[in-house]
């Protein structure tokens, strides 16, 4: 069983694309759409529908291992998914980073990490972005200072 939350924030086409990826990984799973985490507990509890052996044997990655590369299109090509890791030792310019957050490219689906800004030397920002939703939480990093 897979729960797709915040389905009200994506288009029908985006939701279908996501379901396609999930069907590749777990083709027999029941997919439940939810908004703000609201799911009828009866759809989840005491359904007696879970069969570990069937679920683990039907997983897309297991089929991938047994089929090898026969007639397979990698997900990066099939769904246009890519990823990268951005690292930098210098802190960001606070105003420029803030402007970038408010004008983030639409093709960035998910981003997360720790950000340092030059105007806040003892504060780190934990950034978490999914679609249009961006959250920044700060924490004090004075105890992490390097000693030479």
Image (cartoon, grey):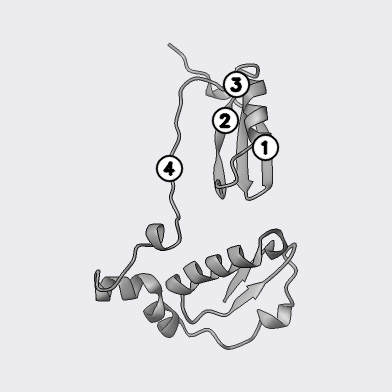
Observer-side mark, 4 or 3, equals 4
Of the numbered discs 2 and 3, the one sitting upstream in the chain is: 2
- The answer for how far apart the CA atoms under marks 4 and 3 are is 29 Å
Of the numbered discs 4 and 3, the one sitting upstream in the chain is: 4
Give the class, few, some or many, for how many residues have Cα within 10 Å of label 4's Cα (few <14, many ≥20). few
Query: In which quadrant of the rendered view does residue 129 lie?
Result: top right
Q: Which residue position is annotated with label 3? A: 142
On screen, residue 145 versus residue 124, left or right, reads: left
Location of residue 129 with respect to 77 vertically, above or below: above
Observer-side mark, 4 or 2, equals 4
- The answer for how far apart the CA atoms under marks 3 and 1 are is 18 Å
Give the class, few, some or many, for how many residues have Cα within 10 Å of label 2's Cα (few <14, many ≥20). some
At 46% from the left edge and 26% from the top edge, which residue is drawn?
Answer: 88
Give the class, few, some or many, for how many residues have Cα within 10 Å of label 1's Cα (few <14, many ≥20). some
Give the class, few, some or many, for how many residues have Cα within 10 Å of label 3's Cα (few <14, many ≥20). few
- In the picture, the quarter occupied by the C terminus is top left
Report the disc number at residue 84: 4
Residue 123 visible in the current orientation: no
């Amino acid at each position: 069983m897979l729960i797709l939350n915040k389905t009200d924030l994506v288009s029908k086409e985006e939701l279908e694309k996501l379901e396609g990826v999930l069907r590749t990984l777990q083709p027999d799973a029941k997919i439940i759409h939810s908004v703000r985490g609201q799911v009828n507990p009866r759809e989840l509890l005491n359904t007696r529908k879970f069969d570990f052996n069937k679920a683990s044997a039907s997983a897309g990655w297991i089929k991938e291992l047994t089929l090898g590369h026969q007639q397979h299109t990698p997900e990066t090509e099939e769904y246009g998914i890519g990823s990268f890791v951005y690292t930098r030792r210098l802190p960001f310019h606070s105003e420029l980073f803030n402007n970038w957050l408010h004008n983030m490219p639409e093709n960035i689906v998910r981003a997360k990490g720790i950000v340092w800004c030059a105007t806040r030397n003892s504060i780190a920002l934990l950034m978490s972005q999914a679609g249009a939703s961006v959250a920044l939480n700060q924490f004090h990093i004075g105890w992490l200072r390097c000693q030479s």
